[in-house]
Amino acid sequence: MIRLYDSATGEVREVRPRDPGRLAMYVCGPTVYDLPHLGHGRFALVWDVARRWFTFRGLVVDYVSNVTDIDDKIIARAAREATSEHEVAATYEDEWWRALARLGVAAPTHAPHATHYVESMVTLIGELVARDVAYRTGDGVYFDVACVPDYGLLAGQPLDSLRAGARVEANEEKRSVLDFALWKAAKPGEPHWASPFGEGRPGWHTECVVMSLDLLGEGFDLHCGGLDLKFPHHENERAQAAALGRPFARHWAHNGWVMVGEQKMSKSLDNFTTLTDLLARTDPRAYRLLVLRAHYRSPVEVTAATIADATRALERLDALARRFALPRLAGASLVRDEVEWRGEAAALAAAVGTHLDDDLNTPVAVAALFEAVTRTHALADEGRADEAGQLALAVAVLFGAMGLALEDRREEIDAHSAELVARRDAARAARDWARADELRDQLGAQGWLVEDGPAGTVVRRP
RNA sequence: GGCGGCGUGGCCGAGUGGUUAGGCAGGGGCCUGCAAAGCCCCGUACUCCGGUUCGAAUCCGGACGCCGCCUCCA
């Protein structure tokens, strides 16, 4: 039984799939107007981990994550760079998938685009107008939040309270400052689509309603996103579905923020700003491990120091893969790894499962796995090779269930380096330590880290 | 103003009414020709002030500090 915190009820609740054996989840994706930043990376990783765990538990997951490819920011950027909105969106969407691929985030089952759903959005907005829960103004169509009795559910505040804190807005035609745009009338030169409400484009909050209901159906299981989407974005999605009487997401989940210490993220010094920057200089798995070591609802500190910390922790895991020649798991595939769980491996799997089932408690699961790493080496040191090998494999499979691949990073070496290795082995056999050390230095100069194992000199990239 | 969250050992980061989180860094030891990797041991932390309790870092109250949302930010 998998339990997950539900932002709508404020408690950890069992996730009960609508259709037995299947899980329909929707994750709000990015607006593609700039390079993805660390926060985008976190939500992608968190929900990828959730998806993989559900899959590992035997559910078939329908994972939908959208791309918002028409938006004010895209229009602004296109204008600024004297290019087209389509060009801007295509460029940054490309960057988005590239970054996700590097992070090892599995491709969504469906990745709908807002611009492909405009017609459906127009239909939905028309229904809202027909039901008199939306109204036209000089610049578009707005949703009347007062028509939804429990508006504010996700925000945890009643409508009046939300309204009281809202800032004054220029638009005099809105009935409430909380009313939001369903349709925006096109200004000269902007992209536009035809509609009964005039030429224009959809507001942001409608696309997810249409796409989730279309691809996952009414009463889908799980709707996820960053904490900042809880209100107003998700509240407004809910409101539209509620106003139409259509069952919407049955469970809401939100991930916490990426923090960068006291300093704002900036390109100066060692602060990272974009995912692209981070991935250019670190092993993508280090970011996944960093994200896994914090609970998904907690803020996580991302600095050069915490990335370096995670990178070194990762080296410990890779060392396990080297010693036990573990297969590389957790690739793009979401196939469940069938292993025969026995003894300590079974106990480990049970412990990890218990923690992940409990609101996706990855930090405790990771802690258990690190303890198992120590235990594995100790078993091997005692000569209990079979048990050690099994436990090592269990560690790899369970990290794989969270999308983290352990890598035996010994690589093919060039003939020259191989020659140096051979000469070093010969020197060591002859107990010519000075010569052996000299050859180690030479290998080091070639970028190899030298380790002496039972089988002789072994080199790897540091 | 309203709502919500947080303050843990050098750093990151879990957890919990009383028994070791974990990682990284650091110290000591073992192994090794020397290293590397690995194993063993070590820190005895929980913003402050009250209260409840046999016992609180964990519950309650207050203070201080920090942060988020109430603006189409993941």
Image (cartoon, coloured by chain):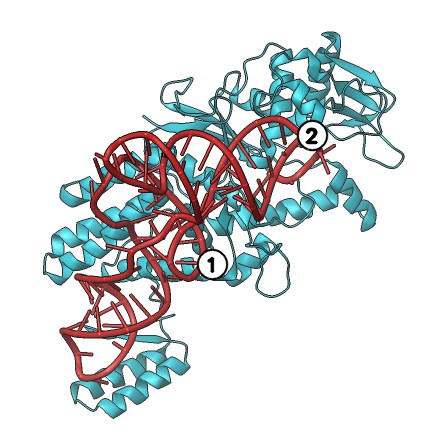
Chain colours: A cyan, B red
Q: Where does residue A370 sit, x and y in percent of width and height?
A: 28, 52
Left or right position of A209 against A193: left
Q: Is residue A171 above or below residue A317?
A: above
Provide the residue designation for mark 1: A307
Pick the residue in front: A377 or A20: A377
Q: Is residue A80 visible?
A: yes
Q: Is residue A12 above or below residue A151?
A: below
Tell me the quarter of the image containing the C terminus of chain A. Answer: bottom left
Distance of label 2 from label 1 (alpha carbons): 34 Å
Q: Where does residue A59 sit, x and y in percent of width and height?
A: 36, 28
Q: How many marks?
A: 2
Image quadrant assignment for residue B51: top left
Q: What residue is at 64 percent from the left and 61 percent from the top?
A: A267
For label 1, the SS is: helix
Pick the residue in front: A84 or A259: A259
| Labels 2 and 1: the sequence-earlier one | 2
Crowding at label 1, few (<14), some or many (≥20) Cα neighbours within 10 Å? some
> What residue occupies the far left of the structure in this picture?
A383
Q: What residue is at 63 percent from the left and 44 percent from the top?
A: A93
Left or right position of A447 against A341: right
Q: Where does residue A314 sit, x and y in percent of width and height?
A: 37, 58
Image quadrant assignment for residue A53: top left
Disc 2 is attached to a residue of which chain?
A
Q: Amino acid at mark 2?
A: Trp
Q: Which mark is residue A204?
A: 2
Q: Amino acid at mark 1?
A: Ile
Q: What residue is at 55 percent from the left and 23 percent from the top?
A: A215
Disc 1 is attached to a residue of which chain?
A
For label 2, the SS is: helix
